[in-house]
Every structure is written in C-alpha cells, then in structure tokens.
Image (cartoon, rainbow, N blue to C red):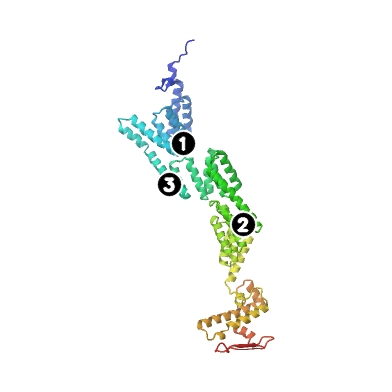
Amino acid sequence: MAAETVNEMDVEIVDQENPQDFTFIPKDNVELAELKKENGNQLYKIKQYRQALPLYTEAIELCPDSAGYYGNRAACYMMLGRYKDAFDDARKSIQLDDQYLKGYIRVLKCSLALGDIATAEQSINNIKQLSMNANTNNDDTNNTVLQSIDNEIKSLNIIKLYTDEAQKAYEKSDYRKVVYCMDRLLEQCPACVKYKLMKAECLAYLTRYQEAQEIANDILHIDKSNADAIYVRGMCLFYEDNIDRAFSHFQHVLRLAPDHTKAMNIYKRAKLLKQKKDEGNEAFKKNKFDEAYALYTEALKIDQFNAITNAKLYFNRAIVLSKLNKLPEAIADCNEALKLDENYLKALLRRAKCYMDSQDYEAAVRDYEKACKLDKSRDNKRLLQDAKLALKKSKRKDYYKILGIDKNATEDDIKKAYRKRALVHHPDRHANASEHERKEQERKFKELGEAYGILSDPKKKARYDNGHDIDDLEGGMHADIDPNQVFQSFFGGGVPGHATEFNFSSGGFPGAFSFQFG
C-alpha cells in the first residue's frame, strides 16, 4: 500500500530548525488561531483581560506549539494578577523557542512577583546573554533591551535588601520591623506566598490576630493544603486561648509536613502550658497556695507571646498572693495581667480589692470606676460606692486611732482610753516644753476631746461609723465640744466612785502635776 501523502496546502510546519520534529497542523487551524490571537490582542489593548484570556487559550488549543501564543496568554495572566499561571506559560514559551526574548522577560517579571529570587537572577543573565548574541554588532539594540529590564533589576536589589533586613529582625524578635520589611517586599513581590505568611506570623506575635488570620485564610482559599497557612491559623487560635482548635490545626500541619519545626515546637508549648495551668488550678482548689504559685510561675515562662493565657495566669497568681496576704505582690501581678489585656475585668476588680485591703482607697476608686465603665452591673456599682465611702472615711480624723482603741470598743473602753491619754497630753504637763512641742500637745489634747465627744455620744458615733461627714449634723458634730470641758468632766468634777485631786501649775513636773485616787 502506498504511503499516505499530505497536501502541503493544508498544513503548517512548526519547528523549521528541527524537521525531524515536524508537527502538521491544518492550515485552517493556523488561520483560525491567528484570528483568535488578534481578537484577544484587541481586547487586551482596551484592558478587557478576562475576555481576552479565553481567546488566547483557544489559539493555544489550535496551535499548541506556538511560543507567541503562550507569551500572549502569560501577559494576560499577569494583568489579572495570576502570576503563577503567567509564570508557567512564560516558561512554556521559552521551552518552545529558546530565543524568545519576551518570554524571558515575562519569566523575570513573574519570578519577581512570586518572590523567586534565584529564577529572577537566572532570567536576567539569560536576557543579557540572548541580547548580546542577537545583537553582537548593535550596541544600541543591546542597551535598549537592558533598559527594558532596568526596573526589574532595581526591584531585585530592593528585594535582596529587605530580605536581609527581615532575617536580622526576625532573629532579634523585632516583629514590627519584620512586618515593615514584608510590606516593602510585597510591593515588589505582590504574589509571594512566603512573604505574606511571614507577615502573618509576625502579626500573630504582635497580637494582631484578625489581620494574621485574614492573610492565612486568603492563601488557604487558593491552596487548602498550605501547611504554613494552617500553622498561622493555629498560632492565632492558641494565642486567643482557643486551645482545642489550636491543637487540631497543629496536628493537621504535622500530618501534611511532619518536619514542620515551628508547628512541632508550638504544639509542645501549648500542651505544656495547658498542663501547668490545669495543675495550678487543681493545687489552688486544694488550698495548696505555695504549690499553685510555683505552677503558675512555671506556666508563665513557657510562651511569652500568649498574652491572653498569660494574663489569666497572672490573675490566678494574684489571687494566690492575696490568699497568702502578699498584697503588693498581688497588685503587681494584676498590673501585669492588665498590661496584657487592658480590659480584663476580673484582674481590674482583683486589683481594686487589693487596694482596698491595703487602704489605698483612691487607687481602689479609680479601678472600680473603670470597672463600672466596662460592666455597669449592680455589684460593681456597690463596690464603687463602698470604695468612695472608705475614701471619704480615710480623709477624716480616725478617732479610734486617736484614742488607741478598736472599733468594737465599749463605752467603758472609750472612757478609760480618754482618761489615760488626756493625762499624757494635757498642755499644763508640757508647760516647760518648746513652743513647737506645746502646740503639738495642745493639738493632740484637742483631738482627744473631739474623739471622746464623738465616740461617747451614740448618735454621733453611729453617724461617724457610717461615714457621714463630721459636720453633717446641725451645728457640726464637734462644734460644741470643748476639750477642756471634757477633761473637767473627768477630773475637775470628780470621777464617780473616786475621790480625785489634781493640780496643774506652770512649774510642770514633778510636783506641779499631782493626782490621787481615794
């Protein structure tokens, strides 16, 4: 049987330099492919890239070995921001035609957009070499080609600079600097997944969890199996104290990439942190406060970036310190908790209580006022009122302290205390003292009279104990109290059941002041 012949009018021979690789394409296909390409070009010129794209694809399907068609589609993909697809087409175009200069330039642009530095450098070298070979005797043409990639060369140098800066900053845990560097890099490499995820990881370290998760989610929308993106989401969940979901993310990462060091390390830390916190809580429930303190302290050393969990640990430790009556230390732990979470209501209320117990009522009022802004509950309002009342009381004279008695003292205790101190501070006893000392003793003597006048009167004592102002009563609670009259009531008029004789003279002690009880 004679060999089948092919009409040359119906075919297009591709790859003229390698006739052994003849590909026969019906001429109608070639013409139709050209028509598709031209229509695509017209749409491309008016920036209708989405409409142009399928036309280039149809041209490629008709003539799959045309470097120019792949080059055109690569350009269209680039305008749509689909740099990975554009890169694949550009690579295909130079595989089909290793002298296709536009293909190399598009590989360069795409590799920069994707953050593929090694390929970008190789592409620049290829372009330079191709330009030199093609224009050995034409320096102007060679210079024009080099000028066409001048921006890409500058971009590559910027990428190298900020990549180096970011690496140094990351090693120093300067995550704000890393985020800044990543933003500069993404201006040059808008499609680089690696830079996006590095930024997301550092945002998580900076407690900007929502921004970090949005970046990770965008990447996972395109690539559901991206282990680094899943790792970032797990980080955010862990630092938001969503431990169980974080565990499942880390486990997923390790299934996809068993050697993912960061995921393995944070997974171990997360498990240890949960263990120590739970053990501390159990010790606290059993009133083993020293043990609970030690366990919470160990837990706080595990992960410095877990702000929410660490805030809770500081709060728990503050409660332990309160139980141990270490109020300054408890306040310090509440401060640390509030540094990590400024709206942590429980820590705010605990610190306020510690201030109350420390009699720092002004600080307690400030905390309770802030607590009421965060939560206007009836309990918080009551606590604020109590703190304000305590502050009000603290600014008055403490008559119990002046008499040297406690608030549960009986009427007889009050009288005995006054009798004892009045004899010590009466001005006549200090007649020969310095002027400053005499005035000080007069002040104390007057205060003793006031204290006795208030605390010996049941009505006034009740108002004083309830925090009312001293001058709330008509005429004032102590306006009618004469310290000398109070003293005379004890000594000048005699004491019931006793015969009393006393004498004050300007001569002072001894002899000038004498008293005896019959």
Circle 2 SS class: helix
Give the number of the disc on residue 292: 2
Please rate how many residues cluster around mark 1, counting C-alpha atoms within 10 Å: few if below 14, some from 14 to 19, many from 20.
Answer: many
Please rate how many residues cluster around mark 2, counting C-alpha atoms within 10 Å: few if below 14, some from 14 to 19, many from 20.
Answer: many
Query: Label 1 vs label 3: CA separation?
Result: 25 Å
- Closer to the eye: label 3 or 2: 2
- Closer to the eye: label 2 or 1: 2
To which residue does mark 3 refer? 165
Residue 226: where, in percent of width, then height? 53, 39
Could one spot residue 233 in this view of the protein?
no
To which residue does mark 1 refer? 83
Which residue is depicted at the point 65% across and 78% down? 414
Which residue is depicted at the point 34% across and 30% down? 133
Q: Is 87 or 201 nearer to us in this picture?
A: 201
Q: Are marks 3 and 2 in contact (CB under 8 Å)?
A: no
As displayed, is residue 290 above or below residue 478? above
Q: Is 435 or 191 nearer to us in this picture?
A: 435
Query: Label 2 vs label 1: CA separation?
Result: 55 Å
Which residue is depicted at the point 56% across and 54% down? 300
| Among the two numbered marks 2 and 1 on one chain, the one whose residue lies closer to the N terminus | 1
Where does the C terminus fall, quadrant-wise?
Answer: bottom right
Q: Quadrant of residue 375?
A: bottom right
As displayed, is residue 372 above or below residue 66? below
Which residue reaches farthest right? 497
Residue 343: where, in percent of width, then height? 56, 56
Residue 7: where, in percent of width, then height? 44, 15
Label 1 sits on what residue type? Tyr
Query: In the figure, is residue 392 to the left or right of 196?
Result: right
Which residue is depicted at the point 54% across and 80% down? 440
Query: In the figure, is residue 25 to the left or right of 391?
Result: left
| Among the two numbered marks 3 and 2 on one chain, the one whose residue lies closer to the N terminus | 3
